[in-house]
Amino acid sequence: MENEAHFLDLAVKSVSGNITGEEQQELHEMMQGNVLLKAEYEQIRHSWHYVMGLGDDFKPDAKSAWQQVKNRLNIRPSAGQAVISRLPLYRYMKYAAVIIAIVSSAIVAYYIYSNQAVKVTTARGERRQVTLPDKSTIWLNEESRLEYARHMNDKEQRRILLEGEAYFEVTKNQNRPFIVEAGSSITRVLGTSFNLRAVEGERIEVGLMEGKVSFADVRSKWSLLLQPGEMAYMERDGGHGKTSYRDTNFLFWKNRMLRFSSQPLEQVLSILGKAYNVEFKLQDSVLAKRTITASLQGDTIQNAIDVLQVMLNVNIVKKGTTYLVRSHHSVNENAEQ
């Protein structure tokens, strides 16, 4: 009996992928030349793969599983006679061990399946919209990674892992907090809209549009409560703080919109450079003092360049990977020389 239980233990470990190389060798040696053990192993393996192939509505059913085992092993009472009178007790113990192994496999399989993480990644230049099981919506920026539990609705907390940048519109649920882990930061919300940026090598930033969020560092135990219109940040060395933002240009990656209100051209070009991942150089110091009030929208930088050239009466020329910004006066002078 001890050897039988040990075999069943190894068999379940093998089909579930939790067996060591030494145990796998031992299992192989036990089945070598033993047709009955091989048959039992195949039965357990079949049950395991069957369970892993079930959908989201699967729930382990021990009674049904036991009936399947009885059918497979041909355990049926003969007319007027109970099965137990025909078979020795150890045979029933053996069958019980088999069903325990199979049902245990089913439960483990269901647990693993329900806790599987859904992973969403984006490549350079790619953006994706993701709808979570709780109907919350996430917009994932380029070169970012998102991870959440497949069955997050079954959890007490809606927990998300983020690397990169994402915008969240969270479905309200007072009883189940929505938690985003990014680096060593934790952002807790109940229902709100916010942007979280956690790019490797840069400080972590969260900007709040609606609702309330708590932004904290798991290492230092401090936390900041944000109101709409506020942004919190955490430096990689632990420094932190919050401020009010004057515009939502940090959301350009999501809505492709930039708004400027009496902002210096030098600052505008810096924001444009980050938005489109290019570099601008002012070649006329007088232009640095010019201010811009405008709304720029579009997926390509050419639209922004066209608007600036008309508004400021400047010439913007691309040289290599850099855009040179000159006044027409400077261009004419260079042409005459």
Image (tube, rainbow, N blue to C red):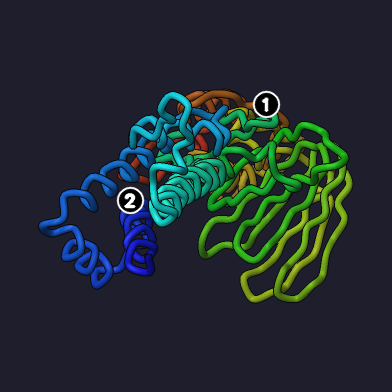
From what the image shows, is residue 164 above or below residue 53?
Answer: below
Residue neighbourhood size for the residue with mark 1, other residues' Cα within 10 Å, grouped as few (<14), some (14–19), many (≥20): few
| Residue plotted at (62% across, 51% down) | 197
Query: How many angstroms separate mark 1 from mark 2 (CA)?
Result: 60 Å
Q: Is residue 135 visible?
A: yes
Q: Is residue 281 visible?
A: no
Disc 1 residue type (three-letter):
Ser
| Residue plotted at (31% across, 44% down) | 45
The image quarter in which residue 83 lies: top left
From what the image shows, is residue 19 above or below residue 160?
Answer: below
| Residue sitting nearer the eye, 42 or 79 | 79
Quarter placement of the N terminus: bottom left
Verify CB contact (< 8 Å) between mark 1 and mark 2: no
Residue 15's label in the rendered image is: 2
Residue 288, how many percent across, how many down? 62, 48
Foreground tag (1 vs 2): 2
Does dot 2 land on a helix, a strand or a loop? helix
Q: Which residue is mark 1?
A: 295
Q: Which mark is first along the chain, 2 or 1?
A: 2
Quarter placement of the C terminus: top left
Number of disc labels: 2
The image quarter in which residue 255 lies: top right
Which residue lies most toward the left here? Answer: 33
Disc 2 residue type (three-letter):
Val
| Residue plotted at (75% across, 68% down) | 240
Residue neighbourhood size for the residue with mark 2, other residues' Cα within 10 Å, grouped as few (<14), some (14–19), many (≥20): some
